[in-house]
Image (cartoon, rainbow, N blue to C red):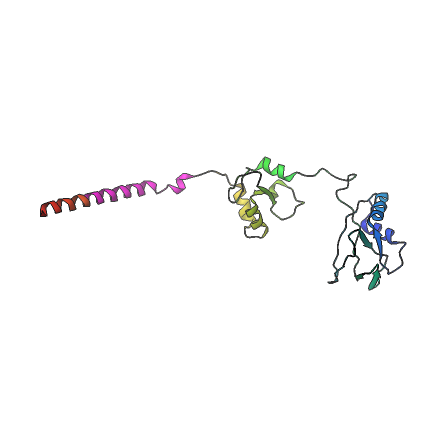
Amino acid sequence: MVCHQDVSLELAASLSEGVVQPVKVGEVIAFAEEAGVAVVPALHDVQGQTVKMGTATTWYTKSVSWADEAVATGVKLSLAPFLFLHTNPIRASTMTTRVNYRKMAFEVYEPLCAHCGFGIPAVLEVAHIDGQRANNEIGNLVILCPNCHKMLDLDLISNETIIQMRDRPKIVTWSKRMKDAGKKAALTRKRSATAKKAVATRRRNRGDQS
């Protein structure tokens, strides 16, 4: 496979040393296709020197060495090249099957937000716990609502919390909430009986006084 540096240098071989010249997008694509390499544009900002683009239809490449400054078609480029050619990882000839990590997650985990329990599948998202979108291992995936997904990305919810809540059984345990329900009910009944007795006593006392 041709690396992007080789493609860039070969494409720029005809350019004058240290001079930046515009290269039409079609020419870049045609050259890359002949070389068997797909290309994607990459914008670089080196040493704080921002590259300003003249037109949206022209890409700039470099010769073997760069001058500190070069002017081409009225566009000033400083220190850094504007465009590199990169091998496209999704080229048909070398493309591997794309992993449908959303389908994987929904086949393994319940269609609920692991953190808050929200459960409308069409709204739910699949997050990568370690933040690496290329890591599609099932253990790195978690179903979240958009709000919880954002909080995970901002580290407002820790990875450990998400994993724990994702993996624990989603079982409602009423007994935890009702563990003192019997005692509370008995106390309520006792208070009610006492109140009724007090009311009856006051009524009798008023009757005796009359």
**Residue 124 on image: x %, y %:** 57, 41
- Residue 69: image quadrant is bottom right
**Residue 179 on image: x %, y %:** 37, 42
Check residue 182 for magenta coloring: yes
Say which of 81 and 183 sits in front. Answer: 81
- Residue 166: image quadrant is top right
Say which of 205 and 5 sits in front. Answer: 205
The magenta segment is 172-197
Q: Is residue 108 left or right of residue 186?
A: right
- Residue drawn 39% across and 42% down? 177
- Residue drawn 39% across and 39% down? 175
- Residue 71: image quadrant is bottom right
Say which of 184 and 40 sits in front. Answer: 40
Q: Is residue 41 left or right of residue 207?
A: right
Q: Main secondary structure of the magenta part?
A: helix
Placement of the N terminus among the 4 image quadrants: top right
Q: Residue furthest bottom?
A: 68
- Number of numbered discs: 0
**Residue 84 on image: x %, y %:** 79, 53
Q: Residue furthest top?
A: 107
Check residue 99 for magenta coloring: no
Q: Is residue 142 left or right of residue 189?
A: right
**Residue 197 on image: x %, y %:** 19, 43
- Residue drawn 41% across and 39% down? 174
- Residue drawn 15% across and 45% down? 203
Q: Is residue 167 left or right of residue 67?
A: left
